Image (cartoon, rainbow, N blue to C red):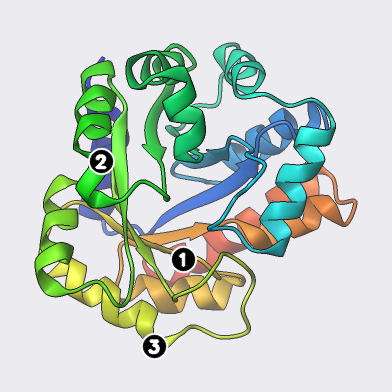
Amino acid sequence: MSAAPLEQTLRDRVASGRSILVPYVTGGLGGDEWLNVLAAMADAGADAIEVGLPFSDPVMDGPTIQAASQAALDAGATPEGILSSLRGAEVGVPLVAMTYYNLVFRAGHERFAALLCEAGVTGAIVPDLPLEESAAWERDAAAAGVAPVLLAAPVTPDDRLEQIAQRSRGFVYAVSVMGVTGERAAVAASAVSVARRLKRLTETPVLVGFGVSTPAQAVELSRDADGVVVASALMRIVLDGGAAEDVGEAVAAMRSALDEAHPG
């Protein structure tokens, strides 16, 4: 397997004129119920799904994802257990793992990448691994068939942004604001700026995340980016007691809004 499946799927969406929608689910949240959430997201029109592997010190995550991660950890979730569950899941869309470098380091690059690949995961986001130190992980991940997705922030200087655009695989994750993940009332101007800057540098799909909370925001951001990543707004539904079907309805509403704005 190569690292192509994730990126090729998203490139095909862009080529068709469709905006990309990547929802997020915290692995292990609610016991096995998270697998039902995963399936509901796919059925609702997700182009790929980001699966969080919970970590006890999620420095990039805001209160909602922190709470979801802690709830999963309290219920006994482990990276190995989450990935084992994915091996039997027939989702039908590419899966992207999101976790922190401590877990990658403890397992070892090659073993961690192999575990992802065996679970059918074709992309990985490691947000706390600096660009200057990520080359070895990028190489080992790609060798195992896992696309290393890199992040770009609004304040990233041009020379560094160009490196990120050139080295990221699968997609480039454009962080909408300086800060942690979380629901926000409006789209930040910085999100539009970083998306436009990246689009000038790469043909790899550019997706905006951190704070995408409503269908209207998803549509607004997709005018300058190739699509969006949606996390906190969906995990808030689960934390508030919503079922997989409720999450699916929220994803379907975003899918419908994006398709109406960009019918392809």
Which residue is disc 2 drawn over?
A: 134
Pointer 3 residue: 189
Instruction: Tell me the amino acid under the disc marked 3.
Output: Ala
Q: Residue at x 73, y 26 (%)?
A: 77
Do the residues under discs 2 and 3 have CB atoms within 8 angstroms?
Answer: no
Label 1 is placed on what type of residue?
A: Leu
Of helix, strand and loop, which one carries label 1?
A: helix
- Please determine whether, in this image, residue 8 is positioned above or below residue 158: above
Which residue is the site of mark 1?
258
Which residue does the image show at 34% across and 57% down from the upper left? Answer: 18
Q: Real-space Cα distance between discs 2 and 3?
A: 29 Å
Would residue 105 be found to the left or right of residue 192 on screen? right
Q: Nearer the viewer, mark 2 or mark 3?
A: 2
x and y, in percent, of residue 174 in the image = 34, 64
The disc, 3 or 1, on the residue closer to the chain's N-terminal end is: 3
* Amino acid at the residue labelled 2: Ser
Q: Residues within 10 Å of mark 2 (few under 14, many from 20)?
A: some
Q: Position of residue 86 (x, y in %)?
A: 58, 19
**Vertical arrangement, residue 100 with respect to residue 142, above or below:** below
The answer to which of marks 2 and 3 sits earlier in the sequence is: 2
